[in-house]
Amino acid sequence: MTNEKTARTVVITGGAQGLGRAFADAFAAAGDLVVVADIDAAGAARAATEIEAAGGRAIAVPVDVTDASSARALAEAADAAGAGGIHVIVNNAAIYATLTRAPFDEIDEPEWDRVMAVNLKGPWQVVKAASPYLGDGARIVNVSSATVMSGSAQWAHYVASKAGVIGLTRVLAKELGARGVTVNAVAPGFTLTEASLGLIPDAAQYGVDRGAIARAIEPVDIVGAVMFLAGPASGFVTGQTLVVDGGRQFL
């Protein structure tokens, strides 16, 4: 395992469960100090405790990514917890399973605003707050969605928010490139997380028939892409979006 003095500090928003927890486990297994950031304080604490029990290093930080002061507190806690600075940010926090599927002209306006606040404003807030602590070679990975490419009907607020994440990724890549920071996005297909399993009937078969690899997508399938974009092998990759959906669509 990586020495504590050289371990990277990795901030994962929405890290208490689902994809975020899968990412947290992978970074911890690689020897990094994982900052499990989640609005669910109890869930974040439980995840950090389980990671530590498995031999990893983790701390839990409650965060509301829509709130500037909360994002700043997260950045300060992450900087203080490690060897100095923030080395990786995975912007994973999002509203998803609780959304109402409806035609675009029937979506409730407060729900639209809340989706944009968490899914799009949230990554901006977190990177903004963390910016003073990002050193040369830092990595930012934003979690978008393959629904941006397919344009999933009756899902306008979610799809638009995740399309915005791709746009934000490109701008941040331009603005942070001079500092040696890379910014990329991953766009997972429909993945069997706790949230997805409760979203539609027979979730395990959803989209399988459209894939070049004809099976359901598991959280571990997304982990490798995130680890690559957060690692040394991707040092000259920035502003890109990597679709991870088993070949359900080609760009």
Image (tube, rainbow, N blue to C red):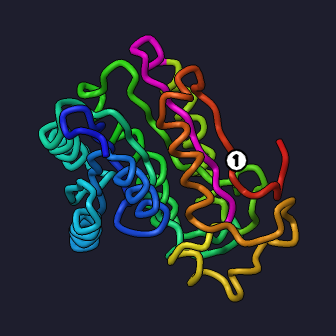
User: Amino acid type of disc 1?
Assistant: Val
Q: Is residue 67 above or below residue 203?
A: above
> Which residue is rendered at x = 70% and y = 47% of the image?
243
Q: Which of the 4 image quadrants contains residue 199? A: bottom right
Magenta region, residue range: 175-190
Residue 186 shown in magenta: yes
Q: Residue at the spot x=39%, y=59% of the render?
A: 25
Residue 36 position by quadrant: bottom left
Query: In the figure, is residue 70 to the left or right of 214?
Result: left
Q: Residue furthest top?
A: 178
> In the rendered picture of this protein, how many numbered marks are placed on residues?
1
Between 140 and 68, the one lying in front of the other is 140
| Relative horizontal placement of residue 60, taking residue 138 as reference (left or right) | left
Rendering coords of residue 58 (x, y %): 23, 55
Q: Nearer the viewer, residue 30 or 175?
A: 30
x then y, percent, for residue 246:
76, 58
Q: Which residue is at 50% across, 30% downward?
A: 183
Q: Is residue 117 above or below residue 9?
A: below
Query: Neighbour class for label 1 at 10 Å: few (<14), some, many (≥20)?
Result: many
- SS for callout 1: strand
Q: Is residue 40 visible?
A: no
Give the residue at mark 1. 243
**Can residue 58 be seen by looking at this rendering?**
yes
Quarter of the image with the C terminus in it: top right
Image location of residue 109, percent across then percent down: 51, 64
Q: Reply yes or no: does residue 247 show up in magenta.
A: no
Q: Position of residue 132 (x, y in %)?
A: 24, 25
Furthest toward the left, the residue is: 80
Farthest residue to the front: give it.
1
What residue is drawn where x is 42% and y is 46%? 90
